[in-house]
Image (cartoon, grey):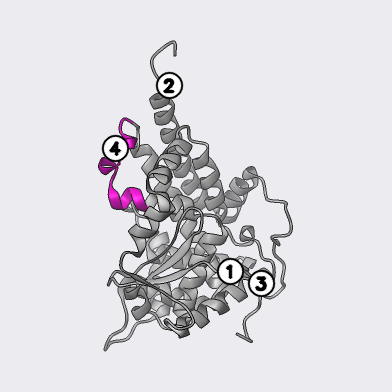
């Protein structure tokens, strides 16, 4: 703990990916979006969400997985976060974790994730999930997970609504939100290679009786982003349309790009970052400008795709909520 910088009063806007903030604000502007959120949240409620996610889970504390609990306290201290969201470990081989909930968000680590990662990598995941909570992502991620888990057809109170464009737009934001939380994980570990190793294991598992290479994985990540023709790019979009998370190679490359930009060192080394006590927040237009200017043509193409998704979603909801003529 002594060799990690404490990020006193740090605001989530210090690390949030500009495409995440732009996507979330645009998503909120889609006609009918608030109705979907209200209906899903009202149907399940805080208790229903907890039942869904904690049916087979154990709450972590001083006397339950005390090493993980101690590590969690260190993560909270590094991010100078005064609240202590509940932390659970759920018995499942799937390698995943989530920060969910409406009023009182909590963190769930799958046992498969805990077993796969070493101590430093678990720290990265804890920081990642805390980043979601600090950014206020959990209401929307919970809605997305419910829709994916339960299925639209099993939510009769949403019948008759044009939901496919909404799903596409929500998933697009979810993936951008992951890029923000990845940065939070790095700010907690303060070691880019640990974050890259985490992505590597989530993508391909542990070494077992073999060897795995972070450097080879980063080379693969660069090749995925820069290689291929137009058809490959189209398939990349299709393959991720209904995914909640970007591919591990994409996440590794994106985080490496943030480090190389100097923004990471500005926070960790120079101590220059926005504080929670500073009420000023960059306007939405600045997020679009930052995304386009910082990531170059690749980001401009991504934002064009994002805008197209949201335009189609907005048109669909406008049509669905317009009703008969004269009403």
Q: Position of residue 290 (x, y in %)?
A: 62, 51
Residue underneath mark 1:
260
Residue 52 is at least partly visible in this image: yes
Q: Is residue 234 magenta?
A: no
* Magenta residues (range): 145-160
Q: Quadrant of the N terminus?
A: bottom right
Dot 3 or dot 4: first in sequence order is: 3
Apparent side of residue 313 relative to residue 292 in the rendered image (left or right): left
Q: Characterize the local packing of mark 4: few (<14), some (14-19) or many (20 or more) Cα atoms within 10 angstroms.
A: few
Residue underneath mark 3:
7
**Who is closer to the viewer here, 287 or 189?**
189
Disc 3 vs disc 4: which is toward the camera? 4
Disc 4 vs disc 2: which is toward the camera? 4
Apparent side of residue 254 relative to residue 44 in the rendered image (left or right): right
Residue 241 is at least partly visible in this image: no
Residue underneath mark 4:
156
Give SS at disc 1.
helix
User: Label for residue 322?
Assistant: 2
């Amino acid at each position: 703990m002594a060799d990690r910088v404490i990020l006193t009063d740090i605001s989530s806007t210090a690390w949030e990916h500009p495409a995440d903030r732009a996507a979330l604000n645009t998503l909120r502007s889609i006609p009918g979006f608030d109705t979907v959120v209200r209906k899903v949240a009202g149907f399940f409620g805080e208790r229903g969400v907890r039942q869904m996610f904690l049916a087979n889970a154990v709450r972590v504390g001083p006397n339950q997985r005390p090493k993980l609990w101690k590590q969690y306290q260190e993560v909270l201290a590094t991010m100078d976060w005064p609240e202590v969201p509940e932390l659970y470990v759920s018995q499942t081989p799937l390698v995943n974790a989530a920060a969910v909930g409406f009023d009182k968000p909590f963190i769930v680590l799958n046992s498969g994730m805990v077993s796969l990662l070493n101590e430093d990598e678990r720290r990265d995941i804890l920081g990642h999930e805390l980043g979601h909570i600090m950014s206020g992502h959990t209401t929307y991620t919970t809605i997305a997970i419910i829709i994916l888990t339960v299925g639209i057809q099993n939510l009769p109170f949403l019948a008759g609504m044009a939901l496919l464009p909404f799903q596409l737009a929500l998933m697009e934001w979810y993936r951008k939100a992951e890029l923000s939380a990845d940065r939070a994980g790095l700010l907690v570990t303060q070691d880019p290679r640990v974050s890259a190793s985490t992505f590597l294991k989530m993508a391909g598992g542990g070494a077992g009786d073999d060897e795995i290479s972070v450097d080879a994985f980063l080379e693969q990540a660069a090749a995925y982003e820069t290689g291929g023709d137009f058809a490959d790019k189209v398939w990349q979009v299709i393959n991720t349309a209904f995914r909640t998370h970007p591919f591990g190679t994409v996440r590794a490359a994106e985080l490496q790009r943030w480090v190389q930009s100097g923004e990471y060192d500005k926070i960790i080394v120079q101590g220059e970052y926005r504080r929670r006590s500073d009420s000023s927040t960059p306007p939405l237009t600045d997020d679009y400008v930052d995304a386009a200017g910082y990531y170059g043509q690749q980001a401009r193409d991504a934002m064009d795709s994002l805008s197209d998704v949201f335009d189609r979603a907005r048109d669909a909801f406008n049509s669905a909520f317009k009703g008969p003529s004269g009403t």
